[in-house]
Image: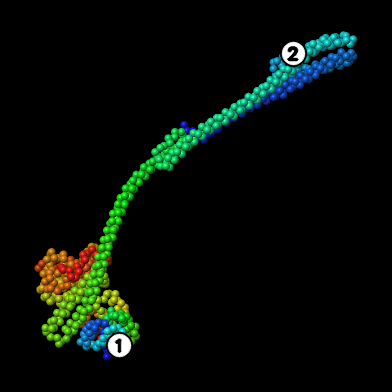
Amino acid sequence: MSFILIVDDNFDNRQIIGQMLSFSGFAVELASDAQTALEIMKHRRPSLILMDLSMPGLDGWTATEYVKRDPRLRDVPVVAVSGHVTRNDIERAKRAGCSEFLPKPIDYDHLITIAQRYTRMN
Amino acid sequence: MRFPIRAKLLGALAIDLILMMVLGFFATHQMATMNDRAVFIERHTIPSLDTVGDMTTAINRYRARQLEFLIYTNNGDRGRILDHMRAIEAEMETYFRTYRPLIGSETEQNRLDTVVAAWQEVIDANHNRFIPAVRLVSDGSVQPFYSRMNPLYDALDKAMNELVQENQRQARASLDVVAASYDTARTFIMIDTVVAIIISAAIGLFLSARIARRLRRLAQAAGQVSEGNLVGSINEHIRDEIGDLAQAFDQMLASLRGQRAELEERNRALQTSLARQEQLMEEVIRGKQAEAEAERARAAAEAASQAKSAFVATMSHELRTPLNAILGYAQLLHLNKAVSEPHTTYVERILTSGRHLLALISDVLDFARIEQGALELEFSRVEVATLVDELAAMTMPLAQRNNNQMITLCPSDIGSIRTDGRRLRQVLINLLSNAAKFTERGTIRLEVTTESRYGTDGIRFAVIDTGIGIPREKQHKLFQPFSQLDESVTRRYEGTGLGLALSKQIVQALGGTIEVESEVGVGSTFTVWIPTAPESAVIIDPSSPAPHMVGEPA
């Protein structure tokens, strides 16, 4: 059963993204930090990861690098989700392996378009 | 007349030399005199006396022969003795002949003549009277005859003696001459030597004293010069080496005086200049201090401004987090079909207000970035025609909301420009949105043309509306933050109040310009010109007025 993994330390963001995707029929898993997300992915392979970048502990850039280094998870697309970020942050995210950047506040239509595009690709 | 010291010294030497030469000449002369006398004695007196001695011997022998003639009666003997006598007579003649060239004086001549005469008388008496008488007597009584000869012999002796005496007198005279010459020479040499010494000493002392005096004057003058007194001069008139030196010294002195005068003049000028410089320096220092204070004040102001900008940036970011949540949940509510009227409208109002707030925060954040000089520009190639199509598509719904017609005029071959497409789009959307908001049942046109400005190729975007227009007196405030015409307008048209001010900043950052032309009731034209390539135009002009910040009343 394919699902979208949402990694965000902010409860509201997790809820909003999760509810929006659920409303459109996607299965989702929520992780409040990158470590938890990596734990989940040990057992189950998501079809798409929506990764918040600035998080306490393991940040989104490092977590994305872990995913992209893992042969089993390498092909899972990662979309960076962040509010106020600099161009440098986005560059770092792309270098780490993020396929796309989704700005906050989340726009429902934009989110669904991206989700559909990457899950269909998979 | 020019007499070098060398010439003077040589002159002194020459005088000495002349004196020495005179001395030598005189001494030679005296020597010659003495030599003459010695030669005279040797060649004359000595042979004379020898001859006189020979003659005396001959006379004695002659007398002895007479005696023999008396004694020997034999005719043969007498004949032999007579022969002897004749031989002696011949001998005597020889002596006389010998003597004649040796005669040194008339007196001697006379004396010799007397001797010759006395001898002749002896001979005559011998041959004429003695011999005949002896021959006649033949008895041996010869005494009377022989005795009669005595006076003659006495006369002869006497004559001889006188001759000898004359010779001796002459010799003595010669010796006297030699002695006198010697005395004269000695005296002369002594006098000459003394005179030479005196003259040399006089000349030497005179010259040396004179030279020393002149050199002392020079030394004194040099001493004065070394003490710094340049007033005097030596004024030597004697033309020699020291004269030359003195003249050179005077020239040097004159030159030094000139140089000192010049130096003093320069020194005065320098002092004046120095004083002026010190004054200037003080002014500069005061200026520097003022500058430093101004710099400190500026730095403090800048630090405050930076702190404020940083604070605004942080606050904007912090404000967005809850706003994101609000907008997210409002969207979720909006998706939920269970929400019914009038709640659906409320949710929409939440979304609209939230998005407005988000735009406001975004603009404030951009402003803070510009103030910090941290506005990031991302230059890339932008196809102008494509951009225009996008703009039309995005603003069409907004325009249609007020029943406006949207027209774009853009040559399809207008090409591309190198700029920050996102920021340019932001500016043009802002202008088009404004046009749509402030126009009802009118026309909004976007005209795009190429235009060169300041020798640079560029693209001109003109947003022309037929809206309410802007009063002329308000136009200049248009690009300042929160300058919307009044509170009611702000409320009615829902602008952030930062759009135009931010647009101006962005356009300037892109190296372009933005202007407005407007007439109330006719419409407004906003013109944005952007260079084809950014070149050196990416820096925000720091001299442009700083935008007013949030919270400041328009």
- Which x, y percent locates residue B528? 19, 68
- Chain letter of the residue carrying label 1: A
**Hey, which quadrant is residue B361 in on the image?**
bottom left
Considering the image in quadrants, where does the C terminus of chain B appear?
Answer: bottom left
Q: Give the quarter of the image for residue B170.
A: top right
Q: Circle 1 — which element?
A: helix
Question: Badge 1: how crowded within 10 Å, few (<14), some, or many (20+)?
Answer: some
Counting from the top left corner in percent of width and height, residue B201 is at 55, 32
The residue mark sitting in front, 2 or 1, is 1
Measured in 3D between alpha carbons, the distance from the residue under mark 2 to the one under mark 1, in whole angstroms, is: 192 Å
| Disc 2 and disc 1 on one polypeptide chain | no
Badge 1 amino acid: Ile
Q: Are marks 2 and 1 in contact (CB under 8 Å)?
A: no
Describe the colour scheme in one phrase. Answer: rainbow
Residue drawn at (36%, 44%), measured in percent from left and top?
B264
Q: Is residue B423 something that shows in the picture?
A: no
Residue at x 63% of width, y 26% of height: B186
Q: Quick one: SS at disc 2?
A: helix
Q: Please, what is the three-letter code of the amino acid marked with disc 2?
A: Thr
* Left or right of B553, for residue A47: right
Q: Which mark is residue A40?
A: 1
Q: Is residue B96 visible?
A: yes
> What residue does disc 2 label?
B114
- Chain letter of disc 2 in the image: B
- Measured as percent of width and height from the top left, residue B301 is found at 25, 65
Query: Which of the pair B449/B545 is nearer the observer?
Result: B545
- Residue shown at 47%/35% (left/top)? B214
Relative placement, left or right, of B249 versus B381 is right
Residue B385 percent location from the top left of the image: 21, 73
